[in-house]
Amino acid sequence: MYGDSELGQTPGLPARDQRAPGCNEQPDLAFTITSPVQGMDFSAAGDAAAKIKRALSQVGLPGSMVRRAAIAAYEAEMNIVIHAYSGTMTANISCDGVQLIAEDCGPGIPDVNLAMQEGYSTAPSHVQEMGFGAGMGLPNIRNCADEMDIVTEEGVGTKITVWIRSRPTEARGEGD
Ligand SMILES: Nc1ncnc2c1ncn2[C@@H]1O[C@H](COP(=O)(O)OP(=O)(O)OP(=O)(O)O)[C@@H](O)[C@H]1O
Ligand SMILES: [Mg+2]
């Protein structure tokens, strides 16, 4: 298991006074989006992340938060497409933030610390020829996330959970 949660902090969403300004308009907003993701199906690759991005934009979450969530969701989805057999991408969305869960059946990650290093990739050559496999997906997710947690078991699969929280300084629509 890998995690970079702040010490002593329970993973979850922020306190009410840490919400983005737009949250006051829809304080009870909460919904979930789940999409299946198929290994090596490049025709549908990115669809789950695009659906999450659309939903986040529609509910009016801060633009920078939408971008961070969209990047993290895309990278996690592509990792299922490229490295696993099948899985699901789930976004739990509230006005406090987004929790992304990418869960797959697959080979698992033997050495998570190695996998987290920039430039490390086991993507096969035919996938690299498509422009993937720079070894930047997991580091990108870490950079976008407020918290990130990886649970993986060799021969079984991987579950990546990412929390992206509204920040008081992120005005709604900022940076759009
Ligand atoms: N869901 C997964 N299942 C199994 N292995 C994974 C999974 N996600 C990542 N990995 C392993 O971690 C490595 C690093 O992942 P990362 O996303 O950083 O790079 P990449 O997918 O190889 O390339 P890029 O994301 O830049 O296209 C992968 O090459 C693979 O070995
Ligand atoms: Mg990747």
Image: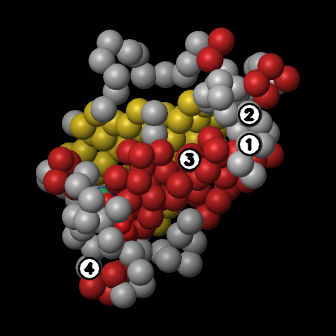
Q: Are marks 1 and 2 in contact (CB under 8 Å)?
A: yes
- Name the N-terminal-most of marks 4 and 3: 3
Q: Residue at x 48, y 75 (%)?
A: 41
Residue that label 2 marks: 171
Kindly report which numbered mark, 1 or 4, lies closer to the viewer in this rendering: 1
Relative side of 116 to 100, left or right: left
Residue that label 1 marks: 174
Q: Are marks 2 and 4 in contact (CB under 8 Å)?
A: no
Kindly report which numbered mark, 3 or 1, lies closer to the viewer in this rendering: 1
Q: What residue occupies the far right of the structure in this picture?
A: 25
- Name the N-terminal-most of marks 3 and 1: 3
Q: Residues within 10 Å of mark 2 (few under 14, many from 20)?
A: some
Helix, strand or loop under label 3? helix
Residue that label 3 marks: 68
Location of residue 168 with respect to 117 vertically, above or below: above
Distance from mark 4 CB to nearest ligand 1 atom below 8 Å: no
Location of residue 10 with respect to 100 vertically, above or below: above
Looking at the picture, which amino acid does disc 4 mark? Pro
Looking at the picture, which amino acid does disc 3 mark? Arg
Q: Would you identify the image quadrant in which residue 123 lies?
A: bottom left
Residue that label 4 marks: 124
How far is mark 3 from mark 2, CA to CA?
A: 14 Å
Looking at the picture, which amino acid does disc 1 mark? Glu
